[in-house]
Amino acid sequence: MNWLGLGFDAPHADDSELVRRLRTGDEACWRELYSRHMGRLYRYALKMTGDEAAARDITQETFVAFLEQSGRYDAARAPLGAWLLGIARNRVRKALAATVEWEPADAAPEPEADGRNALEAMTRAEELAAVRAAVAALPEAFREVVVLIEFEEMTYEETAAALGAPVGTVRSRLHRARALLQQSLAGRKVTQ
């Protein structure tokens, strides 16, 4: 915390101020922006590609592109997180187009028993694997909205900005994706 008002307190600044200062060469702002947005970008890339190495590459490529294009960012048009996800989305599409066959990775750690018996833990793990597989099998446009809204907890507006699509399209795709997931998981009793 910057108690004396000396210097700049990057951790407490908003993204648009950090980008403004980054354009003047403030390296602390770069580190802060990276730490704020890296996790979401990596998770998005991982859920979309199913490949940890590809997700790391996409995350790095997104930030390199951001550095090269930071002058084009306009905070009035979209939050920085949505803009970065738009860049990552383009990188994901290129990565998916370059792969012949996509197989989702079981990226999440196995759930711990949390006091439940081993059978309950195993059943829950199987259910999670089925949900992951069902999401991975969705067409890309539907998988994107599920990943961003359900997993990354983005708003419809943020998702629309990241995808460069109207909010109505995002809502429509999410509705269709949920219907496809329900259809895919029908017959499986998923416990809470």
Image (cartoon, rainbow, N blue to C red):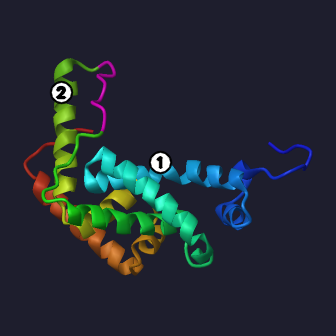
Residue 141 seen in the current view: yes
Instruction: Pick whichever, 188 or 7, lies toward us.
Output: 7
Q: Return the residue found at the far left.
A: 187
Going by the numbered disc 2, the residue's amino acid type is Met
Please report the residue visible at 47 percent of the width from the left and 48 percent of the height from the top. Answer: 39
Residue stretch in magenta: 108-115
Asked if residue 179 lies left or right of residue 148, the reply is left
Percent coordinates x, y for residue 184 in the rendering: 11, 56
Instruction: Pick whichever, 104 or 134, lies toward us.
Output: 104
Residue 179: image quadrant is bottom left
Q: Secondary structure at mark 1?
A: helix
Please report the residue visible at 41 percent of the width from the left and 50 percent of the height from the top. Answer: 42
Mark sitting on residue 16: none
Percent coordinates x, y for residue 160 in the rendering: 42, 74
Queried whether the magenta region covers residue 83, the answer comes back as no
Q: Is residue 37 above or below residue 112?
A: below
Please report the residue visible at 86 percent of the width from the left and 51 percent of the height from the top. Answer: 7
Q: Is residue 37 above or below residue 143?
A: above
Where is mark 2, residue-wise? 122
Decide which of tag 2 and tag 1 comes sooner along the chain: 1
Q: Is residue 93 above or below residue 53?
A: below
Residue 190 seen in the current view: no
Locate the N terminus and report the quarter of the image it occupies.
top right
Going by the numbered disc 1, the residue's amino acid type is Gly
Mark sitting on residue 39: 1
| Predominant SS of the magenta segment | loop
